[in-house]
Image (tube, rainbow, N blue to C red):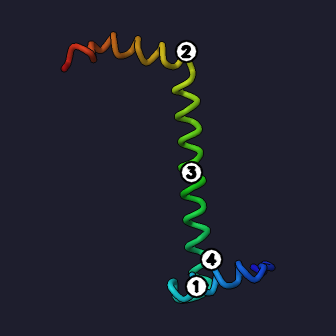
Amino acid sequence: MSIRVDGDTERELAALAEQAGSRNAAVVTAIHAAYRQHLRDQLRAESAALRDDPEYQAAVRAAREDMGADEAW
């Protein structure tokens, strides 16, 4: 893979490469970290959508009532 980077990015990559052992390892690690953050962002967005969905919240309340969840404690 070839990329063009500016001076700041080159310095940051050099620092990461020193820690990771190589430029390749630094890039692979950064990609994995960015992907994990992407997944967390997606989960937060999905959770917020469910939290704000009145139909979903009504279904959760109905399920809790059916199970007697509030009586268990």
Disc 3 crowd, CA 10 A, few/some/many (<14, 14-19, 20+): few
- In this view, which residue lies farthest toward the left? 73
Q: Is residue 39 above or below residue 68?
A: below
User: Looking at the image, is mark 4 or mark 1 earlier in the sequence?
Assistant: 1
User: Residue 73 vs residue 53: left or right?
Assistant: left
The image shows a total of numbered marks equal to: 4
Q: Disc 1 versus disc 2: distance between alpha carbons?
A: 50 Å
Q: Position of residue 65 (x, y in %)?
A: 33, 11
Q: Answer whether labels 3 and 2 touch (C-beta < 8 Å).
A: no
Disc 1 crowd, CA 10 A, few/some/many (<14, 14-19, 20+): some
Amino acid, disc 4 = Val
Amino acid, disc 3 = Leu
Q: Which residue is mark 4?
A: 27
Tag 3's secondary structure? helix
Q: Disc 3 versus disc 4: distance between alpha carbons?
A: 18 Å
Q: Nearer the viewer, mark 4 or mark 1?
A: 1
Q: Tell me which residue sits at (58%, 30%) in the image.
A: 49
User: Looking at the image, is mark 3 or mark 2 earlier in the sequence?
Assistant: 3
User: Looking at the image, is mark 4 or mark 2 earlier in the sequence?
Assistant: 4
Q: Disc 1 versus disc 3: distance between alpha carbons?
A: 26 Å
Q: Which residue is mark 2?
A: 55
Tag 4's secondary structure? helix
Q: Disc 3 versus disc 2: distance between alpha carbons?
A: 25 Å
Quadrant location of residue 37?
A: bottom right
Which part of the image, by quadrant, shows the C terminus?
top left
User: Looking at the image, is mark 3 or mark 4 earlier in the sequence?
Assistant: 4
Q: Tell me which residue sits at (26%, 15%) in the image.
A: 70
- In this view, which residue lies farthest toward the front? 8
Which mark, residue 15?
1
Tag 1's secondary structure? helix
